[in-house]
Amino acid sequence: MISNQPLITLLLFTLLAGLAMPAGAILANLSQRFLHWKTSEIKHGIIAFGGGALLSAIALILVPQGIEHQTIGSAAAYFLAGSIIFMLIDILLDKVKSTASQLVAMLSDFIPEALALGTAIALGSPSSFLLALLMILQNLPEGFNAYNELKQSSRISSLKIIILFILMSLVGPICGVVGYWWLADAPYAISSIMLVAAGGILYSVFQDIAPQAKLDRHWIPSLGATLGFLLGIVGHMSVLIGE
């Protein structure tokens, strides 16, 4: 009899990672209600932290795993294509007067990592638990920042934004199952997706996220980027130890 335990584990891990997004949104909502952003350093610091977490995903997960099954030429092409795609998305968002860059960056990080997690569990990789933990820790500040951005740039109510994030969390299990059933035997496909996502996220960080993190005559918020990237380093080293 074939055990369903790996699939159940996958669904649990990806769902928890996805629910970190609405958890971050709820935290942002509570902060606005009770703190009223009396100090903008907190807000800008968390934005920088989210940017650092995204950079860590690029440097420690998406690019290293993405180049494993690529030639130099194909890796460069997919990476550049990702930046161009996100640039076009950014232009489209500007035309429709939307600034959902944090939301796009959050999903572009979450989807390929969920695919990779599904593949890792299908192959019995011992790093799957720590990869899931890293995804949770990344999605929390990203959900926080994406909520603030949507709240400021749209008239969508707080409840609708949180519900939207809850629905988005279901993308994780879906992508995880795709990786588990279909991409475990297609390493080239998943590595291509990772490189496209990495190029796109890098574009988003420097085009949209990093400028929002800067606060004139304040220097501490920029340390948030360092702490966010440090989070990725700790998670990555934990994965390596687990292997």
Image (spheres, grey):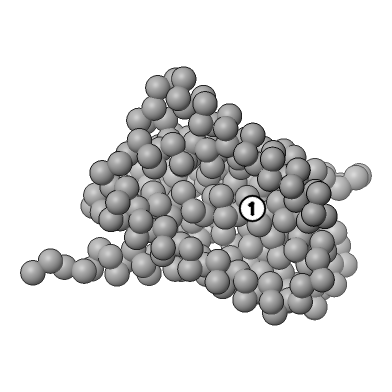
Residue assigned mark 1:
104
Residue 206 in the image: state x and y as whole percent. 72, 38
Q: Which residue is drawn at 68% across and 54% down?
A: 102
In front of the other: 34 or 207: 207
Residue 171 in the image: state x and y as whole percent. 48, 63
Query: Which quadrant of the figure contains the C terminus?
Result: top left
Residue at the right extreme of this rendering: 217
Amino acid at the residue labelled 1: Val
Position above or below: 237 against 114: above
Residue at disc 1, secondary structure: helix
Q: Which residue is drawn at 44% across and 20% down?
A: 72
Q: Residue at x 34, y 60 (%)?
A: 177
On the question of residue 195 being in view, the answer is yes
Left or right: 69 in relation to 168: left
Residue 162 in the image: state x and y as whole percent. 65, 74
Q: Which residue is drawn at 81% across and 66% down?
A: 154
Query: Which quadrant of the figure contains the N terminus?
Result: bottom left
Which corner quadrant of the image does residue 176 belong to?
bottom left
In front of the other: 105 or 210: 105
Residue at the top extreme of this rendering: 73
Figure label count: 1
Left or right: 16 in relation to 147: left
In front of the other: 134 or 22: 22
Q: Residues within 10 Å of mark 1 (few under 14, many from 20)?
A: some
